[in-house]
Each structure stands twice: as C-alpha cells, then as structure tokens.
Amino acid sequence: MKAIRVHQFGEPDVMKLETVSDPQPGPGEVLVRIKAAGVNPVDTYIRVGAYTKPPLPYTPGMDAAGTVDAVGNEVRGLKVGDRVYTSGTLTGAYAELALCSVEQVHPLPARVSFAQGAGINIPYATAYRALFYRAHTHAGEVLLIHGASGGVGIAAVQIARAAGLTVIGTAGTERGRALVKEQGAHHVFDHRTADYLDQVVALTEGRGVDVILEMLANVNLGKDLTVLAKSGRVVVIGSRGTVEINPREAMARDAAILGMTLFNTSEQDTASIHAALVAGLENGTLRPIVGKELPLAEAPQAHRAVMEPGAYGKIILIP
Ligand code: NAP
C-alpha cells in the first residue's frame, strides 16, 4: 500500500509518499481501507518532534474514515465493507490502509461522507469533552468559542447549539465568521479587532460569559478571565506559548481555568463520547465541514496550511 512515512522529525517535507507492505489484522484488530484522513494541528507537533515521539519511521495521522477491509479473530459487530471512522490507529492514518484496535473503530452513518468522517474524531471528541466533561456546561449558559472557525471550533458550535447554549464564536476572517454563523453561532466576532471582547461583555449586558473554549491560550487567557461571569470556566484547548494572567481576575469571579488534553480521556469516556457523536451524526446535528481536500502526496502542503491563519473547517487528505 501507499503511505506517508516520516524517517526523521522536522519540517513538512520530511513526509514522503512510499510503498510499504499491507498490515494484517491480529486478534481484536480491524483493517480499514482509508478513503479520507483528517489533518490535525497535533500531527504537525508530532512531526517536528515537539510532542510524543513515535519510533521512526512512522506514518502520521489519527483520524480517518473508510470501510472495513478485514477483521482479526475476536472482533464482533463489524464486517468487511462496513463504513467506519477511526479514533486513532495502530499504524497511522495517512495511508491507503490502517490497522486499528476494535475500540478505535466507530460506525459512520450513511448521511456522512468519508471526507466528513475524517473530520470527526479529534475535533468533535475534543469539543464534546471540553464542554461536558471539563466545563460541565448546561443548557441556558452563555459560551464563548474563542477560535470557532477551525476543526474544534466548528464542532463546538454545532454541539453547543444543539445542547441549548447561547453560542458566541470568533474567527479572524469574513469567510470564517460566515461559516461560524451558518453552523449555529448566535453571535460572531472578529478576534483580530481591538475591542471585540468589550462587545462580548456588552452583549451579555455586563454579566460576562459562563464558559470559554480557548483555542489560543497564550494570546487570550489573561483577557479571557476578565470577560467571565461569576463561577465562569475557561477550558484551555490550544496554547502555543506562555502567557501572563492576573490571578485576581479569577479570584473575583470564583472562576476556574481547566486544562484539557484529549489523550487523557479514559477508555470508558471515549466509548461514551463516540456514542454521543454517532447519535449526533445520525440525526444531522453534527455535520463536519470540509474546507480543503488534498491528495495524500500533498501531506506537506496540508501541514503548512493547518498552521496558517484563516481556518475554514477541516483539511482532509485523500489516498
Ligand atoms: P484549526 O482548525 O487550525 O483552527 C484554529 C483556530 O484558532 C481557528 O478558529 C483560528 O481562527 C483560531 N485562532 C487564530 N488566532 C486566534 C486568536 N488570536 N484568538 C482566538 N482564536 C484564534 O485547529 P483546531 O483543530 O481547531 O485546533 C485548535 C487548537 O486546539 C490547536 O492549537 C490544537 O493544537 C488544539 N487542540 C487541542 C486538543 C487537546 O486535546 N487539548 C485537541 C484538539 C486540538 P482564524 O484562523 O479564523 O483566525
């Protein structure tokens, strides 16, 4: 099969399309024929060697959608040809085939395309876990999605809107803001303007927001604390550096800063989160947005694009 291989950590061009032998499923394993693979910022952090370091060479990618190609012994409830999406793989998603443990494979409802299916796992599971397992948010609360135009942000907009929150989203481009609005945000702001957080507070008549999902904490966390309502929570989802905060802003509001890493999710919670996501995909509440599709060989270009401003849903690779 064809697969992207990384032989040394570094710039995007360390990713090369190569021919490798087809993996074979062992007991409890499923071989998935990949129709689309999702590109996430974490794939770039791993590629440069700044995150978990897989043994070299390796094939990047955790999120994919496709069909079951073969199942190993002891696999129940899945058969060859079933449409599925993955929450991680054993051999890497940027490839024509990926070996997965049976727990990493979830049904892909008929109304969801393979390209959309590749945009489910990391974005939607992160948004869901941040909202319900970390912030314990509930219907009627006011939510600020600080960075709503990308993979996690769009997922959060759709999930939170369906759950009965008042949704405020931010994006840095006109096109991104239009998408955030179209996907269900009640209000949209431009995080590149000077006074947008004042406008957010004005919108709540000075009360502030109950929950913030923060995609760029190194830039925003200090300001986030000043726009929270009493007992407000900030969930730090993304951060690319350090930041200075005034702890008094948190004290005055009984506020909480909650860290969150998807990879800390227990097996039980992962299963539960995906059950919820599949239900939302089935009934059309969750509709992953594919902003860009590129052939697998253009993985380096996809990695450059995912780190650029001007997000618009997901970037997907097609083997
Ligand atoms: P993405 O698709 O590249 O989207 C990035 C988002 O950040 C866009 O909405 C972008 O808006 C926004 N952004 C840019 N500048 C901003 C600013 N000054 N203030 C607020 N938002 C700003 O990435 P993603 O997949 O959604 O992931 C978002 C972040 O979360 C990444 O850093 C990623 O590594 C991290 N993440 C963490 C976890 C976890 O487990 N903790 C899981 C998934 C992702 P514009 O482009 O419109 O300006």
Image (cartoon, grey):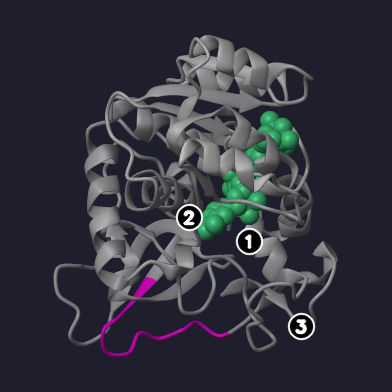
In the visual, does 266 lie left or right of 240?
left
- Are the two marked residues, 3 and 2, in contact with CB atoms closer than 8 angstroms? no
Residue 248 spot, x, y in % from top left: 62, 42
Q: Circle 2: is it few (<14), some (14-19), or many (20+) Cα within 10 Å?
A: many
Residue 7, which numbered label? 3
Which residues lie in the magenta part?
A: 21-31
* Amino acid on which the number 2 mark rests in the picture: Ile
Q: Residue at x 74, y 72 (%)?
A: 50
- Point out the tag, 1 or 2, that comes first from the N-terminus: 1
- Point out the tag, 3 or 2, that comes first from the N-terminus: 3
Image quarter for ligand 1? top right
* Amino acid on which the number 3 mark rests in the picture: His
Q: What is the C-alpha distance between the residues marked 1 and 2? A: 9 Å
Q: Mark 2 = which residue?
A: 122
Ligand 1 closer than 8 Å to the CB at disc 1? yes
Closer-to-camera residue (132/122)? 132
Magenta stretch secondary structure, dominant: loop
Ligand 1 closer than 8 Å to the CB at disc 2? yes
Q: Quadrant of residue 192?
A: top right
189 versus 17 height, above or below: above
Q: Residue at x 75, y 45 (%)?
A: 305
Q: Residue at x 49, y 36 (%)?
A: 253
Ligand 1 closer than 8 Å to the CB at disc 3? no
Dot 2 lies on which element? helix
* Amino acid on which the number 1 mark rests in the picture: Val
Q: Circle 1: is it few (<14), some (14-19), or many (20+) Cα within 10 Å?
A: some
Q: What is the C-alpha distance between the residues marked 3 and 2? A: 25 Å
240 versus 220 height, above or below: below
In the visual, does 183 lie left or right of 221?
left
Q: Mark 1 = which residue?
A: 42
Residue 119 magenta: no
- Are the two marked residues, 1 and 2, in contact with CB atoms closer than 8 angstroms? yes
